[in-house]
Amino acid sequence: MEYSLTYGKLKSLFSQERSEISIPESYIRIHNISFRSELPLNEFMNENDRSISENSIFSYPVFSPKNPDSAKVILLLHGLNERSWIKYLTWAANLAEFTDSYVILFPISFHINRSPDKWKDPREMIHLLKNRHSSLGETDMSSFANIALSNRLAEDPMRFFKSGYQTVADIVRLVSDVKSGNHPLVPKTSKINIFAYSIGAFLAEILMIGNPGNLFSGSRLFIFCGGSVFSNMRGASKFIMDKRAFDRVYNYYLYDFEKTIKGDNPLTEYLNNSSVGLAFRSMIDLGRFRAFREAMLRKLRGQIRTVTLSKDLIIPAKGVVATLGQFSKDRLRVCDFPFSYSHENPFPVLASPLSKKVDYWFENIFSEAALFLA
């Protein structure tokens, strides 16, 4: 599979308005499956967020393999502040083809098509950006691409947790449906593996450590450009959130979060007494619930493989090694590509001879992922 050519082909073909999409010269099909989020404990979210209908009723793509009876399934989890599946289409097609798996691309709460269209409209967002600059002054890494998320997280840092909480609840239902044979497309199976990138890796680690309902016992997790605890991430980026928002979120979870989860209410009950709540808290900082996190990662050492990039500024390789290195030295690889790349765009589409090197390294990384997840 030539990455650069396939990227362009899938970008032109993909639409979430169509129930099924055929890929020319391929057995792979893309299906858009409808989903209604039934978030328990609605008091976790404020009224404005509950009123965003796109977050509750949406569709998600599933890439079906050549063998329609395949019992192999991969859940693909994306990065923070994504507003489109375009970057991930070639990733999913490759995994479906070379593992003969159904590949489910599931959107995090308030991301991709779970957010209003205006959040990705430059003309709409430029007004928010100007307002933010006029009230707070110029902010490093501020852009129309990140202004919606920046405003939301700066206003309420707990949205970071709440979005993850809803996504976990949705994934638990999705995986339960697949395992019980109740999914409208994917055949019944006993195990679902995960390919996770960026903040999706943070979410996946919490799922693996917390293992709600024992749904991920035996699952394998392949991490790309992710894997560190939150305190070792550097999320300020023109494509993710501005520095003011990141500093607000970072300081909240590092210095205030544990103080706020006291008292008797459903939120504190969940964070203090559920396996997923404890997993989330343990993934904030290396020193937080260290014994619990390390015992679980040691138990999972054979189920996790990680590839990180040496020039990744958002989730630096050093932080990934500090989090996972002692548990999977032989399953953690730090790479450096011979072309200009970034965390947000690890495989750039280039109109130059360098495109062959991008193709090579895409195949290198995804061959490793396919072998591990097959």
Image (cartoon, rainbow, N blue to C red):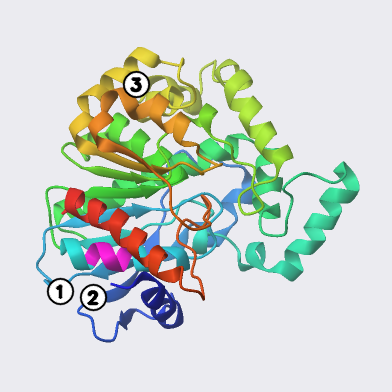
- State the mark number for residue 28: 2
Q: Which mark, residue 293? A: 3
- Expressed as whole percent of the image width and height from the top left, the position of residue 65 reads 19, 70
Label 1: which secondary element: loop
Q: What residue type is labelled 3?
A: Arg
Q: Where is residue 337 in the image (x, y as percent from the top left)?
A: 43, 53
Contact (Cβ within 8 Å) of mark 2 with mark 1 = yes
Determine which quarter of the picture holds residue 35.
Answer: bottom left
- Disc 3 from disc 2: Cα separation: 38 Å
- Discs 3, 2 touching: Cβ within 8 Å: no
Q: How crowded is mark 3: few (under 14 residues within 10 Å), some or many (20 or more)?
A: many
The kind of secondary structure element at disc 2 is loop
Tag 2: residue type? Answer: Ile
Question: Which is nearer the eye, 49 or 374?
Answer: 374
Tell me the residue at 51%/44% (across/down). 311
For the residue pair 73 and 227, the one nearer the viewer reads as 227
Task: Residue 141: say if magenta.
Answer: no
Name which of mark 2 and mark 1 comes first in the sequence: 2
Residue, far bottom? 24
Q: Is the magenta stretch mostly helix, strand or loop?
A: helix
Q: What stretch is highlighted in magenta?
A: 92-96
Disc on the earlier residue, 3 or 2: 2
The three-letter amino acid code for the residue at tag 1 is: Lys
Q: In this view, does 323 lie to the left or right of 151?
A: left
The mark nearer the N terminus, 3 or 1, is: 1
Give the residue number, with chain letter if any, for mark 1: 66
Q: Residues within 10 Å of mark 2 (few under 14, many from 20)?
A: many
Residue 49 location (% of width, % of height): 60, 49
The front one of 281 and 47 is 281
In the picture, the quarter occupied by the N terminus is bottom left
User: Image check: 241 left or right of 205?
Assistant: right
Taking 252 as reference, is 103 above or below it? below
